[in-house]
Amino acid sequence: MPYDKHAVETGRSIFETAVSSLQLTLSEPDLEYLFNQQVIGIDPKGRVILESKKASSKPKSERIKLFEKVNRQIIKRRWAAGIVFKVVRSSCESRPPYKRLLFLPRHLVTMTLPHRRVAGSTYVRHDGDLRLSFHVDPEIGLPFGVYARLILMFLTTERIRSKDRRFELKSSWRAFLQNMELPWNGKKYHRIREQLFRLCSTTFSTHFGKDGEDEKHDSLVISNHWFHSSDCIHITFSDSFFSLTQQSVIPLQSEIIRQIKRSPLALDLYAWLTYRTWKIDREHFIPWRELRRQFGSSLDRNRDFRSRFQTTINHLLSLNPVAPYVSMNRKGLRLAPNNPADVEWIERQVARVTSHTRSSLMI
């Protein structure tokens, strides 16, 4: 749960103590109304979080005055930084159904591809003590950019929905591009085929630990075999990719992907925030230097990366994705648990992936 039992109990105790201290100045109906409020936790800024009610018998102006009194009392006594309201919706109400989702392997969410074409046969990212690397034949080249990311989402989604080891890239891909509002023409087809070839030729490796200590190394390829016929591209998924996408995936909303499809950084951050929503149960702080090692380019200056990162993540958060609580300052990024319904939604979609029911791709 994003707000643990201790945070809920502490928040409730502060709020009820503040209300009790005002009992000589409030009427019995007002006291009853306030004591019936639902406290759901304490946010990273130290404010008591109350669940926002969609409807109330009290006029809005009266409710505001009541909560202002409680807020002033809490701040005056320095019990907390005040109160704040949060709408807690059912995940069924706030998130799209299963058939309007795309998926990415969880293993590859932090292993972000290059944003633009890079020379050489090896590319490295870092996520704390985890080193993420890509290896490919130098004559083929590393996958990069928006199309490589969209292809990876599409392949993962098709693998999950079809439950097949073999896959044909033809009309379904054209339908996917149409859904993403991207034009289909001969030039696009050749760019897509090139990025697909690069993805299927790349070995994705993770190395965890330091030299001389406990170390772990894993490698993954997407496809063991693929060929291009006159009418389509035929792909056979590798054992490792097939197994990985049976359970370890992250669900993404196709509506949000459609709106950020032209930015590699936005696509990476969206998948990463969804993953962190599911993973974190306490506050985390990530310095800018670490974020740059994970998401930045070697061509970026620190201040350029920070500016672009802040602009991108603010735009992304305006689209209401599944995400933890995010705040930024000159030192880095702070993440904290957010809506419990978001975690519930992710877990339910992941549970669906393990189902043996075969269904067509509908996004």
Image: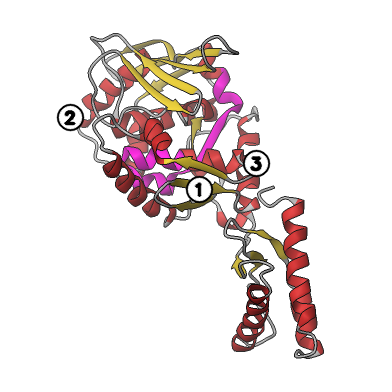
Which disc, if any, is residue 187?
2
Q: Magenta part of the protein: which range? A: 243-271
Q: Main secondary structure of the magenta part?
A: helix
Ranked by sequence position, the earlier of labels 1 and 3 is 1
Q: Amino acid at mark 3?
A: Arg
**Residue 301 in picture, x, y percent from top left:** 26, 38
Res 172 visible: no
Q: Element type at marker 1?
A: strand
State whether residue 220 is above or below residue 59. Answer: above
Q: Amino acid at mark 1?
A: Arg
Please give the residue where the numbered disc 3 appears in the rendered image.
348
Tell me where residue 133 sits by quadrant.
top left
> Is 304 positioned to the left or the right of 248 in the image?
left
Quarter of the picture containing the C terminus is: top left
**Residue 30 in picture, x, y percent from top left:** 75, 86
Answer yes or no: do the residues labelled 1 and 2 have beta carbons within 8 Å? no
